[in-house]
Image (cartoon, helix red, strand yellow):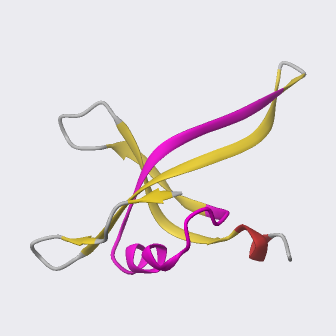
Amino acid sequence: MAKSALRYTPAGIPVAELSLRHEGAVSEAGIERQLGFEFPAIAVGPVAIALDREPLGKALDVAGFIAPKSRRSSRLIVHITEYASSEENRGV
């Protein structure tokens, strides 16, 4: 995970902009395929504050939605609405 400094909107809402990395394997047409890629993400409000406190490189499970970066953009960004430590979700 890479992140920029926590910023605030003119209305005082915290915003965290991140770059996350996914690594895993999927099965496609009966063949296992390894995936590894980075993607942009954003979090707003209390989730942004909490993510800002997380150390770089920590494994996270995120949930949210994908939407265009802005109304006029075709670039997609993941909006994180909740997250948990990957270790917590695996019972480690």
Tell me how many marks there are.
Answer: 0
Quarter containing the C terminus: bottom right
At 64% from the left and 66% from the top, the residue drawn is 58
Q: Position of residue 48 (x, y in %)?
A: 39, 73
Give, as a single range, the part of the protein colored magenta: 33-61
Image side of residue 23 versus residue 65, left or right:
right
Q: Position of residue 44 (x, y in %)?
A: 34, 69
Inspect the magenta stretch and tell me whether residue 11 lies in it. no
At 57% from the left and 70% from the top, the residue drawn is 83
At 48% from the left and 79% from the top, the residue drawn is 53
At 67% from the left and 36% from the top, the residue drawn is 36
Quadrant in the rendering for residue 77: top left
Image side of residue 13 versus residue 87, left or right:
left
Quadrant in the rendering for residue 24: top right
Inspect the magenta stretch and tell me whether residue 59 lies in it. yes
Q: Residue furthest left?
A: 10
Image side of residue 71 versus residue 35, left or right:
left
Report the front residue among 1 and 45: 1
16 shown above or below 21: below
63 shown above or below 47: above
Q: Position of residue 25 (x, y in %)?
A: 80, 37
Report the front residue among 6 and 71: 6
Q: Residue furthest right?
A: 30
Quarter containing the N terminus: bottom right
